[in-house]
Image (tube, coloured by chain):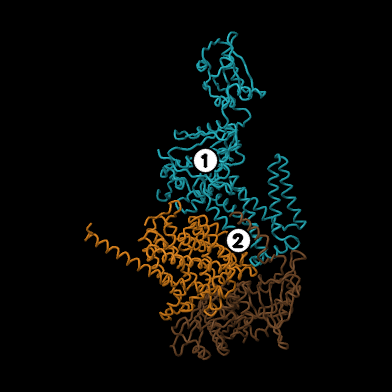
């Protein structure tokens, strides 16, 4: 019997069973971009990958291909590449503005079904053309094929951006009670800039918000440990600007009212320090501190309310109030809540606590 | 009945924990979340408790039957139902274990094919995997128990990796509680049967355990531990996936593993799938061992002959089931058969055994009171 | 007394087929007569015949010149006979006359044959006497080493005494270190041409008699011609001769053998070999180094853990490289992706060929280094290691990352204290590389399952090889992966089934009072 065993094993090794993807014989793709061309109703895909032949530092380079739908793109790309294109190390997907407003359903379903892709992929929307965005990565100014994913990751870590990756996106995308969001990247003369967030309704982008509102959004959804917020301050004809550095923010929701007419209050408890402030404020004086705190509070509440009103106007719910109410009610009726949502009374209540004020007075 | 197994082939009672636990944890844990939410939605984790309790009761019933007769199910069938009917029932049980082994084996190979190597042919994997099974089972029951032990202990640290997806978890998903009817909870409990199958193989290997009667507590511990693992996985999955997302995901545990990041290796799910080989091997080995024991005891032929036949049959059938549809059907059919086997046949056998024992007792008492005049 | 159950060995070619061998050898032939014997002996040029004694009486002595101690012969046999004029009426009186302790009188030609070939002198009153006296003047301390500094099992701390090729010296060393009446020596003869003396050593009252009985039975059942080394005996009596794993522990060091005896194992020595073989042994015994016991337990445990990690690293590192680079490029973190792709861009071979090339080069270096005299060996080591390695990277035949991995694994495979086990580790790497190249990570797991099942099936003298890992005995882990302090290692491991559980009183062994000074103030 041992002989049969050995024979079987030898047979196995000689027949080269599984499909090899030896690392230097494939094209490792880092980013892929999708654009929608409305005139011809076609989709254009662009991939960004490193070339190592010329030395230890890699050269990013791109290939683009046009196809009828996003399913065909990998095949067309292979037609233009000397090595087989491999998506296993994909780290960012960029969607052009037209593509995002047209509808991302197909693409998202394909991505979710693909076992090759990890869940840490960063999706983003390009303010304009994804192809141009990716080609600017290859230019001399940036020349780092991992630029886009590193940019987004770094901003998440310093908490200018709420946490986002494929898993978080899919979580909201497939859920009935939530609406997803993605970061927006803009191009500024060959440099790439993070512009804000794009908010989805179902599978289309309906609106974008800027960086300040993004920070507010982050505070309202999950609290934060970093981040900066600037507020204008006015006292007795003296004007200035204060930068609040957020140290710890806790967010809690509260449902008031009854089943028929619920209303929600979002409580923000912010512990922060004032990073920069105009000279005429004396922060050793407790009355001054109180005044600064109150100004910050009022400002945040005002901005928060305005932001939520904006969301209600567009009928989208990325802060997931629907989901929160669902988890607190038995027999939750999702349709009814969504119908009430645009007129619902949702307020922000903030409490600011200044802890430190820097090392010199 | 006297236990005819030599002591050097027996294992000590505490190993029942590993045997029961390793046969239960197979491929079910990789994809069961999607099935159990069909009834009670995100509260199906409560049904995991219910299923575990019912299985504990069933195990107690099994031990009651086995300790009364002090032998395995082949002898019990022969004793209760006669040579021919008993033999037929044993063959049916053996065939059930064969299909169990086949399902687990084919599902695992399918996972390999979908997740890691799409172009891998089934028969090539079989060429390597089946000799491992041969090597394990031909070493005797002690080697099979050894593999069960290692198949539990070595992959156990992987369970700690469940902490990582909690970072993305939304505990709100689990609320509100008790929002479903009892009937929906029962549906979810029924869906859990497949994951709990495997413990009934005690029916075949009971004589190989030293002091079998004392080993019941280890078996119950094994079931509870499996239930605990299922519970943790389910809770973490429910926190990680939204309900809509979970319905779209065929293998939630593996998809969850995609997000785990350890310092210098990404894509933790590849490590998980590769190590799953070690988790699934005891399940298949024990089931194959049971099949062979049933056949060889009924026909009174050496077990090695049946081992070769069973492996060839595994090879053949695994090639036959070659797409997602058929494998899914295989899983559901097996789940149904297992359901009737454990919730139907075992209580029936238990009652039969009780009644038979009562009748025997009454007869013995009558004999005592009125001894037949000789 | 009941005969103890003996565990039969499954080694092929020795026990099993003995009854099939009807080949005639010297043992089976009918006894020769004394004249035939002496005629046979006279064919060798070192066979001497002397007539000794006074003028009136001449007695005949015959011997093999090379085997006897000439000084002893001259002093103790020739001198008395020449100085003092003996008149012997019968051969038996020689026993009283000569100042030598081992004199026997016999007619048995078989015994004469054996003893003369061992260095005994044959004494006859008359030329054709059949009744002879055999006088022992054996020379034993020529041609063998006097000392052994155990360079192969070197330890920085601790005694560096090892066994030598001479059996009597070894037995003397054993007796000197264990002053106990329970140290029993049991002598056997193995090998029909070499008639090697094999001595079984055990501590009565501790070692389970079943182990001793099994070992004795298996040794007696051997049919072999010349036993060159005790490690051949180890293979001939092992439970499974086709496994790569050593089933008995062989060692040159005295302290290791003593430690095994104290735990309840039995050992045997063979004449002409400095290696003692102890059994039954388990897998984890092979990763124990005497230094673990001479250093404090924290250090000893730490080094033991490093050793075991080194073993895992050396088996799995290269197969993992092959698997990841060939199939699983997705598993590399993004910062490592660049260097690895770049290191492989200009290499023309697939990863498995690269790896095999480097591994076989290292094996060749090792084998060559083992055969060369020391001075040349050192130079070649430097040439081989640095120059060849560097040159292959420059010529782009291999990648530099792989070179680092392979050198580290080669280094890690030498951390095992027992030579036999480190050979096994070196060998184990190759099947894993082949599995990795066929199936990637899953292939490595396949290989690991095969290995695991193989280890589960191994038995050493009837005892499972993987104990205390399986069957799982949680109380036996005091001296396996970690070496706990001496107050905790007083109990002998139960899987050897010793007759006495405790080595010494744990309460009295080094109970440092660790109360805090604060309470004493």
Residue at screen point 43% across, 52% down: B6
Task: Report which residue position mark 1 lands on.
Answer: C218
x and y percent of residue B111 in the render? Answer: 58, 69
State the quadrant of the C terminus of chain B. Answer: bottom left
Is label 1 in a helix, a strand or a loop? Answer: helix
Determine the colour of chain C: cyan
Question: Nearest the camera: C84 or A333?
Answer: C84
Mark sitting on residue B128? 2
Image quadrant in which you'd find residue C395: bottom right
Residue at screen point 54% across, 42% down: C15
Question: Nearest the camera: C91 or A202?
Answer: C91
x and y percent of residue C443 in the render? Answer: 61, 61
With respect to residue B246, does B372 lie above or below? above
- What letter labels the chain drawn in orange? B
Determine the colour of chain A: brown
Query: Distance of mark 2 from mark 1, alpha carbons?
Result: 36 Å
Is residue B225 visible in the rendered image? The answer is: no
């Amino acid at each position: 019997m041992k002989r049969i065993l050995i024979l079987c094993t030898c047979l196995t090794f000689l027949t080269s069973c599984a499909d090899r993807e030896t690392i230097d014989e494939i094209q490792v793709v880092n980013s892929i971009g999708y654009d929608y061309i409305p005139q011809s109703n076609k989709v254009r895909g662009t991939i960004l990958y490193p070339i190592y032949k010329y030395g230890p530092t890699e050269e990013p380079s791109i290939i683009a291909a046009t196809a009828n739908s996003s399913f065909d793109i990998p095949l067309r790309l292979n037609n233009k590449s000397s090595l087989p294109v491999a998506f296993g190390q994909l780290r960012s997907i960029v969607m052009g503005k037209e593509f995002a407003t047209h509808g991302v359903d197909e693409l998202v379903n394909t991505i979710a079904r693909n076992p090759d892709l990890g869940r840490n992929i960063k999706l983003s929307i390009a303010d304009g053309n994804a192809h141009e965005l990716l080609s600017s990565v290859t230019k001399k100014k940036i020349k780092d094929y991992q630029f886009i994913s590193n940019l987004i990751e770094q901003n998440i870590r310093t908490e200018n951006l709420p946490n986002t990756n494929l898993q978080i996106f899919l979580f909201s995308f497939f859920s009935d009670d939530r609406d997803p969001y993605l970061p927006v990247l803009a191009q500024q003369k060959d440099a790439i800039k993070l512009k804000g967030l794009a908010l989805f309704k179902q599978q289309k982008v309906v609106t974008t918000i800027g960086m300040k509102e993004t920070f507010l959004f982050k505070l309202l959804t999950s609290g934060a440990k970093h981040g900066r917020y600037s507020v204008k301050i006015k006292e007795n004809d003296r004007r200035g600007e204060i930068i609040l550095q957020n140290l710890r923010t806790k967010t809690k929701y509260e449902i008031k009212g009854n089943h028929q007419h619920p209303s929600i209050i979002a409580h923000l408890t912010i512990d922060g320090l004032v990073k920069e402030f105009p000279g005429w404020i004396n922060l050793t004086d407790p009355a001054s501190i109180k005044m600064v705190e109150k100004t910050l509070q009022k400002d945040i509440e005002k901005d928060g309310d305005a932001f939520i009103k904006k969301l209600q106007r567009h009928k989208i719910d990325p802060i997931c109030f629907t989901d929160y109410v669902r988890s607190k009610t038995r027999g939750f009726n999702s349709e009814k809540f969504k119908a009430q949502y645009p007129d619902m009374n949702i307020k922000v209540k903030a409490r600011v606590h200044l802890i430190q004020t820097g090392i010199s007075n | 009945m006297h236990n005819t197994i030599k002591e050097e082939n027996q294992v000590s009672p505490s190993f029942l924990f590993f045997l029961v636990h390793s046969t239960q944890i197979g491929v079910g844990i990789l994809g069961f979340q999607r099935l159990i939410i069909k009834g009670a939605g995100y509260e199906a984790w409560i049904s995991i408790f219910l299923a575990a309790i019912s299985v504990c009761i069933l195990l107690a019933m099994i031990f009651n039957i086995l300790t009364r007769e002090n032998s395995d199910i082949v002898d019990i069938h022969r004793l209760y139902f006669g040579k021919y009917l008993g033999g037929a029932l044993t063959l049916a049980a053996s065939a059930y274990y064969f299909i169990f082994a086949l399902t687990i084996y084919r599902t695992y190979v399918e996972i390999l094919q979908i997740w890691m190597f799409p172009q891998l042919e089934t028969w090539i994997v079989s060429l390597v995997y089946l000799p491992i099974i041969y090597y394990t089972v031909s070493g005797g029951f002690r080697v099979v128990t050894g593999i069960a032990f290692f198949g539990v202990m070595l992959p156990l640290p992987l369970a700690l990796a469940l902490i990582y997806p909690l970072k993305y978890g939304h505990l709100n998903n689990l609320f509100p509680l008790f929002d479903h009817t009892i009937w929906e909870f029962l549906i979810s409990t029924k869906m859990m049967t497949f994951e709990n199958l495997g413990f009934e193989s005690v029916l075949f290997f009971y004589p190989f355990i030293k002091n079998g009667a004392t080993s019941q507590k280890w078996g119950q511990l094994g079931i509870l531990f499996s239930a605990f693992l299922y519970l943790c996985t389910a809770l973490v999955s429910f926190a990680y996936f939204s309900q809509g997302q979970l319905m779209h995901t065929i293998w939630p545990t593996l998809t969850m593993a995609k997000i785990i990041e350890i310092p210098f290796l990404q894509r933790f799910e590849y490590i998980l799938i590769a190590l799953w080989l070690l988790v699934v091997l005891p399940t298949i080995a024990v089931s194959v061992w049971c099949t062979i024991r049933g056949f060889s005891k009924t026909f009174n032929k050496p077990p090695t002959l049946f081992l070769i036949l069973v492996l060839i049959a595994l090879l053949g059938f695994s090639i036959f089931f070659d797409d997602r549809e058929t494998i899914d059907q295989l899983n559901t059919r097996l789940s149904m058969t297992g359901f009737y086997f454990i919730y139907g046949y075992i209580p029936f056998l238990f009652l039969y055994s009780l009644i038979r024992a009562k009748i025997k007792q009454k007869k013995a008492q009558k004999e005592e009171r009125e001894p037949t005049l000789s | 007394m009941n005969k103890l159950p003996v565990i039969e060995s499954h080694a092929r070619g020795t026990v099993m087929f003995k009854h099939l061998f009807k080949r005639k050898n010297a043992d089976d032939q009918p006894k020769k007569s004394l004249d035939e014997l002496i005629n046979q002996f006279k064919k060798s040029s070192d066979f001497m015949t002397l007539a000794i004694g006074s003028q009136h009486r001449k007695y005949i002595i015959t011997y093999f010149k090379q085997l006897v101690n000439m000084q002893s012969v001259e002093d103790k046999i020739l001198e008395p006979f020449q100085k003092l004029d003996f008149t012997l009426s019968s051969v038996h009186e020689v026993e009283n006359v000569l100042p030598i302790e081992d004199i026997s009188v016999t007619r048995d030609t078989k015994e004469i044959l054996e003893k003369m070939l061992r260095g005994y002198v044959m004494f006859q009153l008359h030329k054709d006497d059949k009744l002879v006296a055999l006088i022992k003047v054996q020379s034993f301390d020529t041609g063998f080493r006097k000392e052994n500094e155990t360079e192969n099992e070197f330890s920085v701390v601790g005694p560096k005494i090892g066994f030598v090729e001479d059996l009597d010296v070894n037995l003397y060393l054993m007796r000197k270190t264990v002053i106990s009446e329970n140290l029993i020596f049991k002598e056997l003869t193995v090998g029909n041409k070499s008639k090697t003396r094999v001595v079984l050593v055990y501590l009565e009252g501790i070692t389970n008699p079943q182990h001793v009985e099994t070992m004795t039975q298996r040794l007696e059942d051997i049919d072999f011609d010349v036993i060159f080394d005790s490690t051949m005996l180890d293979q001939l009596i092992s439970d499974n001769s086709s496994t790569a794993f050593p089933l008995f522990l062989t060692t040159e060091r005295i302290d290791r053998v003593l430690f095994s005896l104290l735990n309840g194992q039995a050992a045997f020595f063979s004449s002409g070999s400095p290696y003692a073989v102890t059994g039954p042994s388990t897998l984890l015994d092979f990763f124990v180094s005497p230094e673990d016991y001479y250093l404090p337990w924290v250090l000893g445990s730490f080094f033991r853990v490093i050793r075991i990690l080194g073993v895992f690293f050396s088996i799995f590192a290269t197969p993992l490289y092959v698997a990841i680079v060939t199939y699983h490029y997705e598993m590399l973190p993004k910062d490592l992706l660049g260097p690895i792709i770049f290191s492989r861009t200009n290499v023309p071979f697939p990863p498995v060929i690269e790896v095999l090339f480097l591994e076989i080069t290292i094996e060749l270096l090792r084998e060559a280094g083992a055969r060369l005299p020391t001075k040349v060996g050192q130079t070649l080591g430097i040439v081989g290691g640095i120059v060849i390695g560097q040159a292959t990277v420059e010529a782009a035949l291999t990648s530099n990352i792989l070179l680092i991995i392979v050198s580290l694994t080669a280094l890690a495979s030498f951390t095992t204290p027992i030579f036999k086990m480190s050979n096994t580790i070196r060998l184990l790497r190759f099947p894993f590389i082949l599995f990795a190249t066929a199936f990637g990570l899953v292939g490595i797991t396949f290989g690991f399952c095969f290995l695991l099942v193989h280890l589960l099936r191994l038995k050493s003298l009837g005892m499972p090889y993987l104990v205390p890992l399986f069957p799982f005995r949680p109380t036996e882990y005091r001296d396996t992966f970690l070496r706990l302090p001496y107050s905790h290692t007083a109990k002998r491991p139960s899987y050897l089934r010793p007759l006495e559980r405790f080595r010494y009183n744990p309460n009295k062994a080094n109970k440092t009072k660790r109360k805090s000074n604060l309470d004493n103030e």
